Image: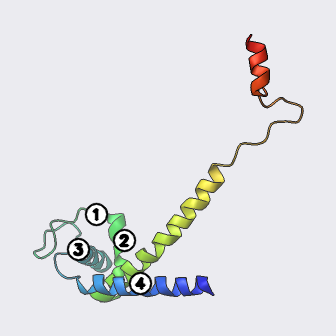
Amino acid sequence: MKRRLIAVALLGVCVVLAVIEAKSQGPGTDFHARWIFGRWFWSGEPLYVDVPGVRGPNLYPPFAAMLFQLHTLLPLKLAAGVFYFCNLLLIPLSVRWSKDICDALWLPPPPPPPGLPTGGPCRSPSSCRRNSS
């Protein structure tokens, strides 16, 4: 039950942050530029032209514009909200996946084979003193 409450709270925070970020979208923002370039790719217009109100020329490769065209299926602010909501949800997932990968890569060392001494020549402080004199 506690995990469900945490998940619902996380979703609520993601929704609020996505709405706040979506409201700030408009001409001149990075998301607006991606949305425009995706729209151009969708409609077959040239991708590398300078347009007033869009920050500089398109610096994205055509492959990126091909992905950006998914944004154009929705109006700008709604597309920005969905985009930021999905990005926020991916943060805890990426942390979890990173932890799983690290756990898989850095396994504890295996125990030594049976019968092999593990303490070196000095197995106890008293035996080290006897060997050194």
**Distance of label 3 from label 4 (alpha carbons):** 26 Å
Disc with the residue nearer the chain's start (1 vs 4): 4
Report whether 32 appears left or right of 62.
left
* Residue annotated with mark 2: 66
Image spot of residue 59 (x, y percent): 24, 62
Amino acid type, mark 1? Tyr
Q: Nearer the viewer, residue 120 or 30?
A: 120
Q: Nearer the viewer, mark 3 or mark 4?
A: 4
Amino acid type, mark 3? Ala
Q: Are marks 1 and 2 in contact (CB under 8 Å)?
A: no
Mark 2: few/some/many CA within 10 Å (<14, 14-19, 20+): some
Quadrant (top left/top right/bottom left/bottom right) for the C terminus: top right
* Residue annotated with mark 1: 60
Q: Are marks 1 and 4 in contact (CB under 8 Å)?
A: no
- Secondary structure, mark 4, is helix
Report whether 112 appears left or right of 45.
right
Image spot of residue 113 (x, y percent): 85, 36
Identify the residue at image location x=22%, y=66%. 58
